[in-house]
């Protein structure tokens, strides 16, 4: 029997965003229910348990800053935290702030309908539980809906099939197996060296070669940790200001790659190559805005790949020929070296795509690859996927899916016109995936909590973005992207990895400017929103 519970706020998702939102709303004295499809907290870090899963932002930065005691008491063991350690941290936070009692697990939200008469959202789930609420906050994550390519015969494979974004919790042992991996994005690049360490034969099916820089992960340096913790709040504040593209400890060098001499440039690239991972892109200020500068960085990485991969033919196939950083740069631990192992085969799909999946494996270009296991490392319906899968209906009954038919439209990535009191944490149109997610999440949650508190204090019940503010913001997001090279490849930032998805650059470029804008909007009595 269906029971409808009334709460002040429903938060969808119990990852980093949902947990902090719950904590803040509770602090305002609201009754809150968090609805989570998984069986525990963690979001992205609950689902992505593939071997080698690791964050590409340093652990001392990829953590909450809202509580000084929390950030002081937690110790990370490595420079870049592994998925199990991040999940432990999230569980620790859930315990420490006693969050689980307001979370309903194994509950997927299927619909959220706004009722203009009662000024409430009606939330339906895949269980018998239904909720009515004033505030509906989507903390559904940017990379939470895995994509499975439509390959002929996909269901016919008789071996085991996995997706990196939905990895079995008990783990997988590929020992002695013939394994195929489809995809060469971050998930593949992290997992391939480890799968290769177990498998008898490994076949990597590569459609687009990717740029990857060694992560240079290492055990946590206790001196560095102590130094940062001695002034953690200042460190975080400085970092927030530095986030022009990614939130990292090392500031971007502002000079142009084109102005340096060849020798200087090599030194600078090499220095950033040694820093590792995403930090490579901090070598020069113009790498993501100037094609020629970018080409110099591309050439540097291609030479590195050639120097690692022993078979020149394999090396050539692994050389990316696109804009570096346009797709998210990968950070690896021994990825290119893996192709020097005799049992690892690179299958190049550039000329011919996979013909079909067969009961025994994969057929490609007239060859049949017999496999025991097939790993899809094929990515996500990013940024809009999770929202589009919920039947969200606003003031006039229009669905969010319809509103976003030509691409997502939001005001500040926080709200959609026609959907009052519905907030999207790190929604499209906000900096989100181009920053340290934790900074963006905390900034959004704080803004939303502040907004709810302001409205309650003034006896107001609704906030709704105006169509004009939304249109102006969408134009501004596009204008920011158009000055960069981010639109020059088929990335998930653009929705280009999902057939039929409109090609729109979804994240907002410029974190400090964005934060200033959000603060200004609040200071100007929620400019661009209608309050009632
Ligand atoms: P990505 O980065 O979207 O990578 C997906 C990979 O799967 C990519 O190499 C795709 O090739 C490949 N792919 C997708 N469909 C196919 C088909 N049909 N045939 C062959 N290859 C295919 O996802 P990840 O999970 O690796 O990483 C996502 C983010 O998570 C990452 O950016 C980090 O922020 C963390 P394509 O390039 O489209 O040709």
Image (cartoon, rainbow, N blue to C red):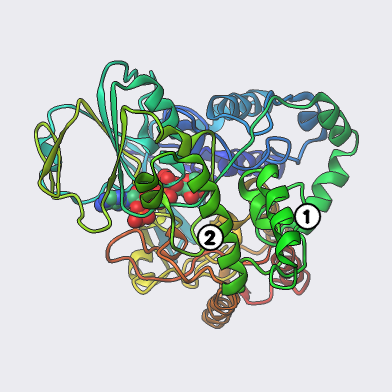
Q: Quadrant of the N terminus?
A: top left
Assign the C terminus to one quadrant of the image.
bottom right
Q: Give SS at disc 1.
A: loop
Cα–Cα span, label 2 and label 1? 19 Å
Crowd band around label 1 with a 10 angstrom C-alpha radius: few (<14), some (14–19), many (20+): some
Label 2 CA crowd tier, 10 Å (few <14, some 14–19, many 20+): many
The answer to which quarter of the image holds residue 385 is bottom left
Q: Label 2: which residue? A: 324
Q: Nearer the viewer, residue 509 or 118?
A: 509
As drawn, the label of residue 251 is 1
Q: Is residue 43 visible?
A: no
Task: State left or right for residue 285 relative to residue 350.
Answer: right
Q: Is residue 187 above or below residue 202?
A: below
Q: Position of residue 23 (x, y in %)?
A: 66, 38
Q: Position of residue 256 (x, y in %)?
A: 73, 70
Give the residue displayed 31% in from the left and 27% down from the top.
343
Q: Is mark 1 within 8 Å of ligand 1?
A: no
The spot of residue 306 in percent (x, y) is 48, 47
For residue 396, the mark is none
**Pointer 2 or 1: first along the chain:** 1
| Between 215 and 97, the one nearer to me in the picture | 215
Residue 421 seen in this snapshot: yes
């Amino acid at each position: 029997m269906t029971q409808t519970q009334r709460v002040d706020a429903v938060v969808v998702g119990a990852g980093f965003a949902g947990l902090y939102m719950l904590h803040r709303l509770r602090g305002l004295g609201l009754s809150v229910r968090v609805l989570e499809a998984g069986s525990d907290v963690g979001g992205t870090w609950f689902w992505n348990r593939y071997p080698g899963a690791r964050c590409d932002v340093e652990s001392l930065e990829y953590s909450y800053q809202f509580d000084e005691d929390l950030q002081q008491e937690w110790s990370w063991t490595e420079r870049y935290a592994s998925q199990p350690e991040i999940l432990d941290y999230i569980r620790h936070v859930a315990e420490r702030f006693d969050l689980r009692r307001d979370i309903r697990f194994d509950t997927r939200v299927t619909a959220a309908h706004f009722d203009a008469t009662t000024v409430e959202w009606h939330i339906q789930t895949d269980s018998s539980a239904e909720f009515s609420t004033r505030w509906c906050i989507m903390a559904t994550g940017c990379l939470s809906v895995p994509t499975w390519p439509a390959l002929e015969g996909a269901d016919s494979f008789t071996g085991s099939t996995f997706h990196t974004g939905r990895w079995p919790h008990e783990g997988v042992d590929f020992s002695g197996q013939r394994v195929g991996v489809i995809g060469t994005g971050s998930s593949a690049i992290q997992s391939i060296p480890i799968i290769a360490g177990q498998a008898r034969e490994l076949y990597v099916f590569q459609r687009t070669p990717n740029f990857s820089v060694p992560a240079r992960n290492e055990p946590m340096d206790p001196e560095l940790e102590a130094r940062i913790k001695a002034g953690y709040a200042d460190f975080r504040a400085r970092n927030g200001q530095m986030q022009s593209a990614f939130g990292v400890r090392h500031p971007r060098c502002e000079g142009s790659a084109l102005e340096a001499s060849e020798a200087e440039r090599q030194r600078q690239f090499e220095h950033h190559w040694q820093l590792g991972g995403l930090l490579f892109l901090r070598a020069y200020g113009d790498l993501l805005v100037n094609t020629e500068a970018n080409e110099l960085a591309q050439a540097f990485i291609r030479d590195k790949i050639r120097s690692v991969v022993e078979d020149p033919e394999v090396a050539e196939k692994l050389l990316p020929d696109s804009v570096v950083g346009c797709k998210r740069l990968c950070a690896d631990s021994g990825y290119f070296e893996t192709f020097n192992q005799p049992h690892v085969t690179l299958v190049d799909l550039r000329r011919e795509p996979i013909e079909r999946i067969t009961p025994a494996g994969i057929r490609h270009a007239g060859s049949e690859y017999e496999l025991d296991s097939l790993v899809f490392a094929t990515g996500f319906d990013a940024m809009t996927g999770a929202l589009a899968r919920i039947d969200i209906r606003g003031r006039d009954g229009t669905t969010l899916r319809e509103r976003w038919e030509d691409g997502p439209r939001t005001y500040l990535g926080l709200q959609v016109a026609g959907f009052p009191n519905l907030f999207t944490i790190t929604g499209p149109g906000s900096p989100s995936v181009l920053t340290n997610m934790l900074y963006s999440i905390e900034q959004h949650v704080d803004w939303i909590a502040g907004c709810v508190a302001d409205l309650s204090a003034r006896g107001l019940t609704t906030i709704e973005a105006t169509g004009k503010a939304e249109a102006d913001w969408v134009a501004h997001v596009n204008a920011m992207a158009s000055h960069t090279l981010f639109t020059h490849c088929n990335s998930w930032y653009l929705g280009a990895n999902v057939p039929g998805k409109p090609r729109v650059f979804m994240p907002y470029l410029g974190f400090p400017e964005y934060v200033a804008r959000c603060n200004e909007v609040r200071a100007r009595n929620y400019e661009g929103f209608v309050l009632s």
